Image (cartoon, helix red, strand yellow):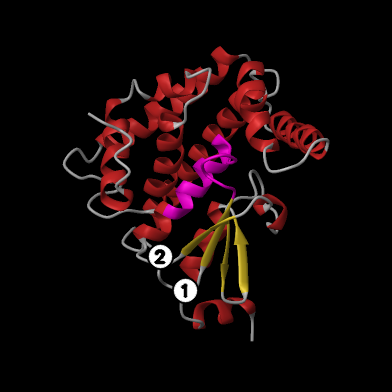
Amino acid sequence: MHTADKLSEEPWPEDATLYQPFEAEQILLPENASCLAVKAYLKMCNLPFGIRSCANAEHMSPGGRMTKLPFIRAGAFIFAEFEPIVNFVEQKDMAIGSFLDEDAKSDMRTYVSLVENIFTMAELYISFKNERVYKEVTAPRNGIVFPWPLSMMQNYSKRNNALRLLKVYQWNDLDIDDVIEKVSKCCETLEYKLRESPDTPFFYGEMPCELDAIAFGHLFSILTTRLPNMALAQTVQKFKHLVSFCRFIDEKYFQTRCLQD
């Protein structure tokens, strides 16, 4: 039997577990955004899952394109990062977004790719290229679970990997104004899409799809993460429809109420 057949035949396991770093003291902005996007997606699909926070979640992950996080263990299967987890759910016919026709689905996936690439790169940039953010937030949080000198080695390795990714995606030589411009244009695109259906709460009407989950994960994380440099949050805050969208998703699925009117 093919793996795809096994995937579709097995029911969603009641003990499905999402693995992530510790939220309060360890997780970094790009990882938090990715983890929140996956949690939102699973909640929108109404699929049960537990959350396990562990210091070495990144090193337990089977790997991925960007943050390697979160990863989910569902029965015999392990998948990491947003798209592979979404694909896994879709193969089990439990996914949101089935109401979209093929053209709309293709259109939606273009937006998903844009959101993941632009926001993840911007989050990595502010976390690892901005010296003040790196010294005051990124390095202390990333190193907190490791004893010295392992913490220094871990920080060096993590920063090198982040800078390598930024170089691959050609963000390494940008200055902060270039980054803000890219984020602003992405927000403009998202807000325009959201306003196409002014009387509905989601990007594609009355029901959520994966774009709603990944946009929320990144936007909400940027808006609610306190950093010495708040340029990303200040940029997103200019887009009132996106802020209202985040408030709506939070209220419906999470109830953190971190975004007050």
Q: Is residue 141 above or below residue 230?
A: below
Q: Which residue is mark 1?
A: 92
Q: Is residue 13 above or below residue 37?
A: below
Most extreme residue toward the bottom is 1
The reply to whether callout 2 and callout 1 are in contact (CB within 8 Å) is yes
- In which quadrant is the C terminus drawn? top left
On screen, residue 69 versus residue 143, left or right, reads: left
Q: Which region shows up in magenta?
A: 21-39
Image quadrant in which you'd find residue 80? bottom right
Indicate the position of residue 48 as horizontal and vertical percent values: 41, 68
Q: What numbered label is drawn on residue 208? A: none
On screen, residue 98 versus residue 64, left or right, reads: left
Is residue 203 among the parts visible in the rendering? no
Q: CA distance from mark 2 to mark 1?
A: 8 Å
| Residue at image point 38% right, 26% down | 188
Q: What kind of element bears circle 1?
A: loop
| Residue at image point 57% right, 37% down | 30
Indicate the position of residue 50 as horizontal and vertical percent values: 47, 64
Indicate the position of residue 241 as horizontal and vertical percent values: 27, 31
On screen, residue 103 versus residue 160, left or right, reads: left
Question: Tag 2: residue type?
Answer: Ala
Q: Which residue is mark 2?
A: 95
Q: Is residue 80 above or below residue 32?
A: below
Question: Tag 1: residue type?
Answer: Lys
| Residue at image point 39% right, 30% down | 189
